[in-house]
Every structure is written in C-alpha cells, then in structure tokens.
Image (tube, rainbow, N blue to C red):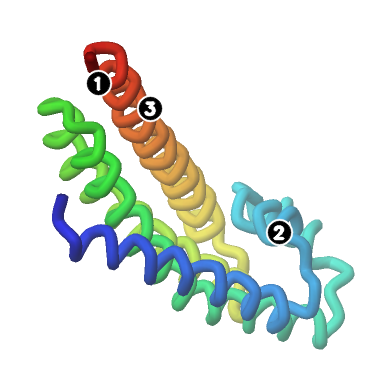
Amino acid sequence: MNPAIRKSLGWSFFATVIVYFLMRKVTNGISGREIVDFEMAKTPERAAELTKFWTPEYQQHFVNGIYIDFLFLICYTIMLYSAARFFGELSKHYVLRKAGNFFAVLSIIAGICDIVENIGMLVTIKKQAYTTMVHLTYDMALVKFSIILIVLLFSIIGLLFFLLSLTERKKYRI
C-alpha cells in the first residue's frame, strides 16, 4: 500500500469537510437543494423561475458559494482520486487495483465538469441565461454527479473486497 495515497486521502477528506462548512457559512445557509436545483435548471425559463425572487443579498451569497465551490471541488477531486486509488489497492484484487487508476482519472473529469458548471452558473447569474450555457451547466452537473456516485460505489466495492479477504484469512487459520 502506497502511504502517500493514504495520507492524501486523509488530508483531502479533512480539507473537503472544512471547505464544506466554510461554504455553508459563506452562503448564509442556502440549502444544498437550492444550489442543486439551480445547477440542474436545464432551461433559461427554469433558471429565471429559480432566480425570480432572489434579493441582491441572496444572489451575492449564492455567487460567493460558487466561488468557494472552486476550492471545494479541488478538495473533493483529490479525495475521490485518492479514494479510488486507495480502495483499489486495499481490495488486493488485481482487476480492482487496475480499475482504481481508471476511477481516479474519472474523478479528475468530475472536477473539470464542476469547473465548467460553476462558470456556467456564474455567466447565467451575472450576465444572461443563454440556452446553451444553462443546458451545458445542466449536462456538466449531471456528468459530475454521476461520476462522483460511480467513484464512491467503486470505493465501497474495494472496501468490501478487502473485508471479504479478511474473513477468508480468518477462515483458514489454524
């Protein structure tokens, strides 16, 4: 087991949690549901419907949350990358070890999708809700969430393979 991966996973998990709480403070309690609703607006009409009753103060909190999300996405991307590598290796299974590298790369793609998504939201809020931009934001959010879910599921599978290998070892001890 590469100790650098374990250390990276620990520090990135800690940083992700800290930045998450920082984001909650900066957004002044805007719910995750409200943020996800805007990410998934898909059409300019839906984006306009969601922003119709925003006060300038609310809008500023929302925009500040997007800016902090750039830091958050760096943290969670490193965490997911490290988790895929760590749990792939931990599984002690040849295929899962190799797959861990693939899922680590996927986590980087999720981070890139989040960057594009954040830029799309900023353009939609600060300039205009262009059809192409709102739909691109939706597509990037959908891909990002899908990849995050897949990488987390892979990590759980790697952990399960590790736990199963422990029970197998106990079974054959004399």
Relative image position of residue 81 (x, y in whole percent)? 29, 55
Q: Residues within 10 Å of mark 2 (few under 14, many from 20)?
A: few
Which is closer to the viewer, label 1 or label 2? 1
Relative image position of residue 89 (x, y in whole percent)? 19, 41
Amino acid type at circle 2 is Gly
Q: Residue at x 26, y 48 (%)?
A: 86
Q: Earlier in the sequence, mark 1 or mark 2?
A: 2
Q: Earlier in the sequence, mark 3 or mark 2?
A: 2
Amino acid type at circle 1 is Arg
Q: Are marks 3 and 1 in contact (CB under 8 Å)?
A: no
Judged from the image, the secondary structure of the residue bearing numbered disc 3 is: helix
Relative image position of residue 12 (x, y in whole percent)? 39, 68
Judged from the image, the secondary structure of the residue bearing numbered disc 1 is: helix
Q: Which residue is mark 2?
A: 32
Instruction: Return the residue nearer the eye: 112 or 170.
Output: 170
Q: Are marks 3 and 2 in contact (CB under 8 Å)?
A: no
Q: Is residue 122 visible?
A: no
Asked if residue 121 is positioned above or below residue 108 in the image, the reply reads: below
Amino acid type at circle 3 is Leu
Instruction: Return the residue nearer the eye: 36 or 167.
Output: 167
Q: Which mark is residue 36?
A: none
Q: Which mark is residue 160?
A: 3
Which is closer to the viewer, label 3 or label 1? 1
Q: Which residue is mark 1?
A: 169
In-image side of 121 versus 163 (left or right): right
Judged from the image, the secondary structure of the residue bearing numbered disc 2 is: helix
Asked if residue 108 is positioned above or below residue 94 in the image, the reply reads: below
